[in-house]
Amino acid sequence: MLRVVSWNINGIRRPLQGVANQEPNNCAAVAVGRILDELDADIVCLQETKVTRDALTEPLAIVEGYNSYFSFSRNRSGYSGVATFCKDSATPLAAEEGLSGLFATQNGDVGCYGNMDEFTQEELRALDSEGRALLTQHKIRTWEGKERTLTLINVYCPHADPGRPERLVFKMRFYRLLQIRAEALLAAGSHVIILGDLNTAHRPIDHWDSVNLECFEEDPGRKWLDGLLSNLGCQSASHVGPFIDSYRCFQPKQEGAFTCWSAVTGARHFNYGSRIDYVLGDRTLVIDTFQASFLLPEVMGSDHCPVGAVLSVSSVPAKQCPPLCTRFLPEFAGTQLKILRFLVPLEQGPVLEQSAPQHNSQTRVQTCQNKARVRSTRPRPSQLGSSRGQKNLKSYFQPSPSCPQASPDIELPSLPLMSALMTPKTSEEEAVAKVVKGQAKASEAKDEKEVRTSFWKSLLAGPLHIPLCGGHREPCVMRTVKKPGPNLGRRFYMCARPRGPPNDPSSRCNFFLWSRPS
């Protein structure tokens, strides 16, 4: 039997919960090995690892009994990324990063790219630069003793942000590239499994709130899945795609079978989520070899749960790992490049080498002469003046010689016009000025007193009063608006209970109240 598992782990470096809770110190590096053991799969595909090569440590990358393969985001740190861990008994024949072949090394690659003429080189590089696809190719043996080739495509498909229309275009182009590569592998005679986070709930049964979503069936991602997947219960040719959703093949009417929940709203408590993680196999492979397809919602530690499948085949391990294996990276293979490798010696001719000592001796003589000349030109202490000791501070405030100084003997000319305009104030004007000045001082003192009073009142008033929600009469929770717009940064109160079905009275109610600024 061959057991494969896929899991959007939401960050491989952070300490995980669930199966890793029993590990001392809850170290992420140690937890990965324990997670792999608990999942007990021959091949484990992880998505959203959120690690770049410079941040990948050896305990995370190299786990005893497994060989691992990583694809990193080349654009952003701590973003996206996928990884595949294979038991030594399921060592792949080949491994490759990306779908386009631009990152292929021509040594140990999977190959079979199909016709990608509809994409530009820049577009292909952009689609593969986020670390969203990783291919491993294995040799399997059926119960009849026949050997076949099986290619696993570990994918983390893009999310279409409603506020960024260009990401929907990016997502659909990624889908298209994925389909071209998968169909090319099928045409070359390999079985294919696409597994991972596809970021689209296919049918209404796969989404809890599908009835309230506008144009659910018209979503471009769902239409793409319609063309990719076969509907086993429909004989129409328009529904016969090259792949089968393995979970719906075994559980066609299972409701509430979700794999992703919002961690912010606590929706997992009421199973208010969607199924966006899949194990898709080609039609022949699923019908002939798949024995089960399952979800593992009891496994905690991420906003997704693992999904997987069991095949009635055995793996034939390769004699050695492909070059993409992390154990062959220079930083882990004991062949870390040293800084001396980047310091190339300068090539010099024989004439220069012979004249170098003479030139160095001349340079030293000239340097000594220059130093002696500088010392001889420095003024001695006796030349600076007769005063000894520390200078007076006033010596630094002498008038500049470039600025002319007014002599005390020179009299300034009188300005009759200005003297005529400056008339002495009367006693009444002086009295009014004193009254105005006194009122201004009193107003400033009053304002300062009010500021101090309001400050101490706000400080001694204690925490703000938390309102009660209208549905359950329970204390609310304060949230902050993070969506760009006029209300960005504003705070509001809402029901503290987890989000759930609208008809469930025990789930979150619709209470909402803006927080008044303090």
Image (cartoon, helix red, strand yellow):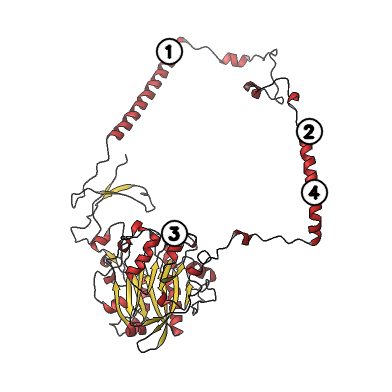
Q: Quadrant of the N terminus?
A: bottom left
- At 80% from the left and 40% from the top, the residue drawn is 369
Q: Amino acid at mark 4?
A: Ser
Separation (CA) of disc 2 from disc 3: 62 Å
Q: Mark 2: give few (<14), some (14-19) or many (20+) Cα within 10 Å.
A: few
Separation of marks 3 and 4 at Cα, in angstroms? 55 Å
**How many residues crowd around disc 1 within 10 Å: few (fewer than 14), some, or many (20 or more)?**
few
> Of marks 3 and 4, which one's residue comes earlier in the chain?
3
> Which label number is shown at residue 376?
2
Please provide percent x and percent y for residue 324.
Answer: 49, 71
Q: Earlier in the sequence, mark 1 or mark 2?
A: 2
The residue that mark 3 highlights is 78
What residue type is disc 1 on?
Ala
Near-viewer residue (275 or 12): 12
Q: Nearer the viewer, mark 1 or mark 4?
A: 4
Q: Please rate how many residues cluster around mark 4, counting C-alpha atoms within 10 Å: few if below 14, some from 14 to 19, many from 20.
A: few
| Horizontal side of residue 314 vs 399, given as left or right | left
**Closer to us: 363 or 303:** 363
Is residue 10 found left or right of 54 in the rendered image? left
Q: First in sequence, mark 4 or 2: give its number.
A: 4
Please rate how many residues cluster around mark 3, counting C-alpha atoms within 10 Å: few if below 14, some from 14 to 19, many from 20: some
Picture quarter containing residue 186?
bottom left
Side of 268 where 221 appears, left or right: right
- How far across and down, in percent of the image, does residue 453 sit? 31, 29
Residue that badge 4 annotates: 361
Q: Mark 2: which secondary structure?
A: helix
Q: Quadrant of residue 208?
A: bottom left
Q: CA distance from mark 1 to mark 2?
A: 72 Å
Identify the residue at horizontal 26%, vertical 77% (top origin): 252
Q: Nearer the viewer, residue 332 or 258?
A: 332
Q: Which residue is mark 1?
A: 431
Give the spatial CA distance, label 4 vs label 2.
Answer: 23 Å
